[in-house]
Image: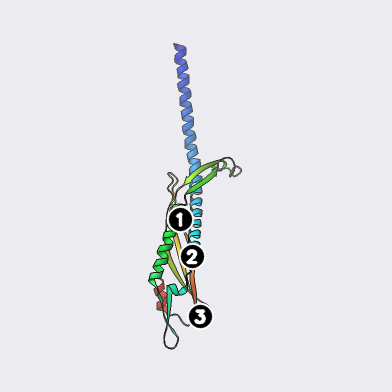
């Protein structure tokens, strides 16, 4: 009986020790993995978002030939002087909504996987990037918005270059439990430009900032 009780004590002690080691290892692993996993998830999400924006915007611009006259109308007086540059809101709103919809649809499908070499979890520069990979699925929640930017710059003697660009801003938030991050990425795409001869009224420059 005594031998049996002693044997049970050894078994219980062994189980307790094994559980304790597993708990300590799990805590160490979590502390080691979390910052690296969060960084990898953020890098992956930004790269995937930028790629989705680039492909969506490029495809949209190839399919839709945007011209300067689609977005702006230059008004002249009887002597040929520029009196105003008027925006065309319907076309501006159309491009903004269509491009935003296209990008957000693409972003919904951009979830994927990233891999972390186990050596990177040790904190050693010598082991960084080495060893087998730990696979993580990244499903970031994202939302993109599109606005139009208007820039007036000098293009020489009595000439002004009016550039109209689409600014895509995407808010990225991780949906990975324990690996939280929030960041924003932005991209700019030229839609159209025009060289305007003559002085551009300040009122036109100011009004275009609203878009």
Tag 3 residue: 159
**CA–CA distance in space, label 3 to label 1:** 40 Å
Mark 2 Cα shell of 10 Å, populated few (<14), some (14-19), many (≥20): few
Instruction: Identify the residue shown where x is 42% and y is 66%.
Output: 95
Q: Residue 120: x and y, percent?
A: 56, 43
**Which residue ends up furthest to the front in the rendered image?**
63
Which callout, 3 or 1, points to the residue nearer the camera?
Answer: 1
Instruction: Identify the residue shown where x is 54% and y is 80%.
Output: 156
Tag 1 residue: 106
Secondary structure, mark 3, is strand
Secondary structure, mark 2, is helix
Q: Which mark is residue 49?
A: none
Q: Which mark is residue 63?
A: 2
Q: Earlier in the sequence, mark 2 or mark 1?
A: 2
Could you tell me if residue 183 is visible in this image?
no
Q: Quadrant of residue 171?
A: bottom left
């Amino acid at each position: 009986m005594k031998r049996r009780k002693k044997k049970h004590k050894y078994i219980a002690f062994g189980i307790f020790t094994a559980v304790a080691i597993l708990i300590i290892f799990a805590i160490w692993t979590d502390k080691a993995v979390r910052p690296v996993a969060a960084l990898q998830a953020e890098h992956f999400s930004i790269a995937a978002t930028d790629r989705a924006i680039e492909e969506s915007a490029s495809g949209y611009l190839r399919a839709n030939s945007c011209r300067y006259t689609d977005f702006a109308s230059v008004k002249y007086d009887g002597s040929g002087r520029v009196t105003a540059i008027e925006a065309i809101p319907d076309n501006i709103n159309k491009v903004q909504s269509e491009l935003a919809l296209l990008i957000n649809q693409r972003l919904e499908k951009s979830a994927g996987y990233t891999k972390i070499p186990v050596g990177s979890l040790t904190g050693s520069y010598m082991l960084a990037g080495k060893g087998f990979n730990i696979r993580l699925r990244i499903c970031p929640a994202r939302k993109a918005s599109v606005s139009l930017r208007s820039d007036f710059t000098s293009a020489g003697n009595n000439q002004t270059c009016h550039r109209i660009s689409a600014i895509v801003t995407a808010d990225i938030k991780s949906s990975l439990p324990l690996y939280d991050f929030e960041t924003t990425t932005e991209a700019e795409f030229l839609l159209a430009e025009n060289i305007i001869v003559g002085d551009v009224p300040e009122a036109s420059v100011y009004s275009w900032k609203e878009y």
